[in-house]
Amino acid sequence: MRKVEEAEAVVLGAGVAGLTAAWLLKERGLRVRVVAQGLGGASRVPVALVNPLRGKRFTLARKGEEALEAALRFYSRFVPLHLGVYRPVPEGEREKVVSRLGGLKHTWDQGGVLLEEAFWLEPRPLLQKLSEGVGVLRSRVLAWEPPYLFLEGGGRIRGEVLVYAGGGQGAHLLGLEGRHIPGLVLLLLDYFPRAISYRVYLAGSALGGSYLPHRSDPEAPPPTEGEVEWLLRGAEDLLGYRPSVASAWRGVRFRLDPSLPPGGVDLSYLFPVEGGFALTGFGSTGFLYAPWLGERLLEVLEW
């Protein structure tokens, strides 16, 4: 019989939420084991925009100011952060946007607002550095029966607490339901050091957004002509011209059903499950919330 590995915390998932939580737990001196089939999943998007002022309605994300501060503190330890996200503001909506900025540092620039501390980063170097610091066991998980995580091939890990951060691919292990949101990023020949965001976003060499409707399964559909056209039209509205495309990247994000799970901690993305906690269902806000919710997880666990 195979030896059972022991850990104080077992983190299931090696995207930005799982690796951030694992790093923070390990810094507290805990024995942590991260288990995932691969590194990153939807977190391996070419560019991650960390922007608390969301969507065309300019809604300040719940706990957005605190989350942005935590993200700045944590990510700047590992990778360069490209500060400044410019949000064009439609004519006549400035007063509404002013009322929604909260305490975010900003300046008004021509026809929009520059969020001075919002930023973009390159996720792949970040994920690589985090994974090297905590170690990732590459394996398919078959079941979670507290306190054991059962792995393909007969392996088992005994954990005092589980942190589920596996997104949509493993949600069935805990009976979690949600929506799967396809997103498309076009890699461009142009480069934008300062991010621009309205309907679509431009940051670095990436043009991204979500056009397709939500899906019930996590499989990534192929890009469509309508989706590419929508992105390019959005870029043209922002730039006055259509940028040239070099390649494309497809990902699928997982978002929990809208209702707050019982016992949710501050935000519905962190909540108790049998034998531990789930840290999942962020949709497009994973990079914004991962460090702040990782800190909240430590508080809840009292570690």
Image (spheres, rainbow, N blue to C red):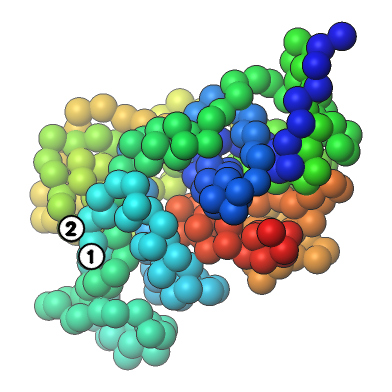
Residue in view at x 26 percent, y 42 percent? 206
Dot 1 corresponds to which residue?
84
Residue placed most toward the observer, 242 or 176: 176
What's the amino acid at mark 2?
Answer: Arg
Q: Residue furthest front?
A: 29
Residue placed most toward the observer, 132 or 144: 132
Residue placed most toward the observer, 135 or 273: 135
Residue in view at x 18 percent, y 58 percent? 194
Residue in view at x 15 percent, y 50 percent? 192
Q: Is residue 70 visible?
A: yes
Mark 2: few, some, or many residues within 10 Å (few <14, many ≥20)? some
Q: Position of residue 254 (x, y in %)?
A: 60, 45
Q: Secondary structure at mark 1?
A: strand
Asked whether, in this view, residue 129 is left or right of residue 194, the answer is right
What's the amino acid at mark 1?
Answer: Gly
Quarter of the image where one finds residue 5: top right
Q: Position of residue 187 (x, y in %)?
A: 25, 35
Q: Do tag 1 and tag 2 residues touch (Cβ < 8 Å)? A: yes
Q: Secondary structure at mark 2?
A: strand
Residue placed most toward the observer, 97 or 90: 97
Q: Is residue 229 visible?
A: no
**How far apart in space, not on screen, are marks 1 and 2 (Cα)?**
6 Å
Total numbered badges shown on the rendered structure: 2
Dot 2 corresponds to which residue?
194
